[in-house]
Image: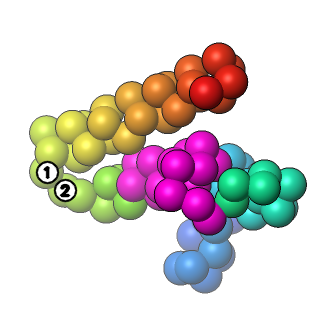
Amino acid sequence: MSKIEKKLPTLTETNPILLWLYKHGIEDLDWGKKDSHFKQIAIASIIHELAKGITDIKIREQIQTGAANSLVNVSGKMKSGK
């Protein structure tokens, strides 16, 4: 953890993907709908970040791998236009 992150309040978001989504999310007309790609990216990113707090290395890696795979799948769908 960097010195800057240690000084930030607990609920300060530092993930650049989520910060971009928060800024530009209104541009997606499907924002907030069940199958929104941006919503899926946000959820997977949050799960990946929250998993850093799990002390069991094996479980943490499984959760982060699942979240990363979800990001890859969603980005593939976005690229193909689905």
28 horizontally vs 40: left or right:
right
**29 over 67 or under it: above or below:** below
Is mark 1 in CB contact (under 8 Å) with mark 2? yes
> Badge 1 is on which residue?
56
Magenta residues, start to end: 32-48
Nearest the eye: 55 or 70: 70
Residue 38 visible in the picture: yes
**Residue 51's quadrant in the figure?**
bottom left
Three-letter amino acid code at the position of disc 2: Thr
Residue 49 visible in the picture: no
Regarding mark 1 in the picture, which secondary structure is present there? loop
**34 over 78 or under it: above or below:** below
Three-letter amino acid code at the position of disc 1: Asp
Nearest the eye: 8 or 61: 61
> Badge 2 is on which residue?
55
Q: Which mark is residue 69?
A: none
Nearest the eye: 41 or 34: 34
Q: Residue at x 31, y 33 (%)?
A: 65
